[in-house]
Amino acid sequence: DTGVSQDPRHKITKRGQNVTFRCDPISEHNRLYWYRQTLGQGPEFLTYFQNEAQLEKSRLLSDRFSAERPKGSFSTLEIQRTEQGDSAMYLCASSLRPSGSSDTQYFGPGTRLTVL
Amino acid sequence: KQEVTQIPAALSVPEGENLVLNCSFTDSAIYNLQWFRQDPGKGLTSLLLIQSSQREQTSGRLNASLDKSSGRSTLYIAASQPGDSATYLCAVIGYSTLTFGKGTMLLVSP
């Protein structure tokens, strides 16, 4: 098992374009999380899935953002009509959560997005 | 809403010093607390996880403590080395998500 992987590692795009990021969690982890981190700040929660179900979304996740985890394995995060304010590091994490307890999240290397 | 504060924001020490990083949180109803390390432009590496029923965890030169009632945690680094230079993030774990502080940027000079 190689840990959480994210692709691409870096993405440069022009304002108004759509971008899609992929996250592959640790195999058999049932939870997958997306966070966004801007310069000088800690990561901020965006959304998470348990298997294929999206259970929670932050108000940071505007209607230009959509996340999917169609088969309960990998996940994609799409940003439509990108804005310069979307420039950030997008981090993915996964965990194996038994019911009724908290868990340890393992983070991927992140995708750094730059919107010109 | 949970808020996490880390002090200091930045710290510069000579190699060999022992140091303490501080983390405070506003809502004591937490499951766990986790300390991470982040190198520039990289993802997060988990250092220590303290469950809410525990008071401390140790790994090598690192020791983390947790006082839920006062909403505080500390990360103690013994005999610091230049390779310890990084940003250290504290995260409070609720039922489903992590709430992070802004981090402490540590520089250890040879």
Image (cartoon, helix red, strand yellow):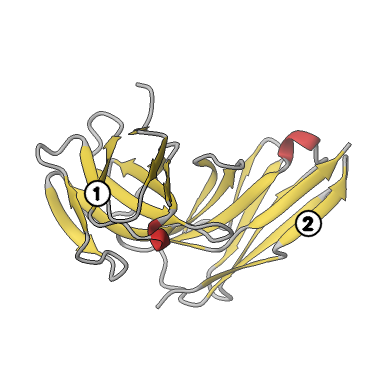
Q: Tell me if residue B88 comes above or below residue B83 in the rendering.
A: below
In this picture, residue A37 sits left or right of residue B104: left
How many dots with numbers? 2
Residue A19 rendering spot, x and y as whole percentages: 27, 45
Residue A72 rendering spot, x and y as whole percentages: 14, 39
Residue A76 rendering spot, x and y as whole percentages: 22, 42
Q: Is residue A83 visible?
A: yes
Q: Tell me if residue B75 comes above or below residue B1 in the rendering.
A: above
Foreground residue among B28 and A78: A78
Checking the image for residue B11, the label placed there is 2
Amino acid type of the residue that numbered disc 2 sits on in the rendered structure: Leu
Could you tell me which secondary element the residue under label 2 belongs to? strand
Neighbourhood count class around disc 1 (C-alpha, 10 Å): few under 14, some 14–19, many 20 upward: some
Identified at 81% across, 43% down, the residue is B108
Marks 2 & 1 on one chain = no
Q: Is residue B97 visible?
A: no
Q: CA distance from mark 2 to mark 1?
A: 39 Å
Identified at 54% across, 75% down, the residue is B69
Amino acid type of the residue that numbered disc 1 sits on in the rendered structure: Asn
Rendered-image quadrant of the N terminus of chain A: top left
Identified at 72% across, 39% down, the residue is B84
Identified at 51% across, 59% down, the residue is A42
Q: Tell me if residue B59 comes above or below residue B23 in the rendering.
A: above
Name which quarter of the figure residue A57 lies in: bottom left
| Subunit bearing disc 1 | A
In this picture, residue A102 sits left or right of residue A77: right
Residue underneath mark 1: A18
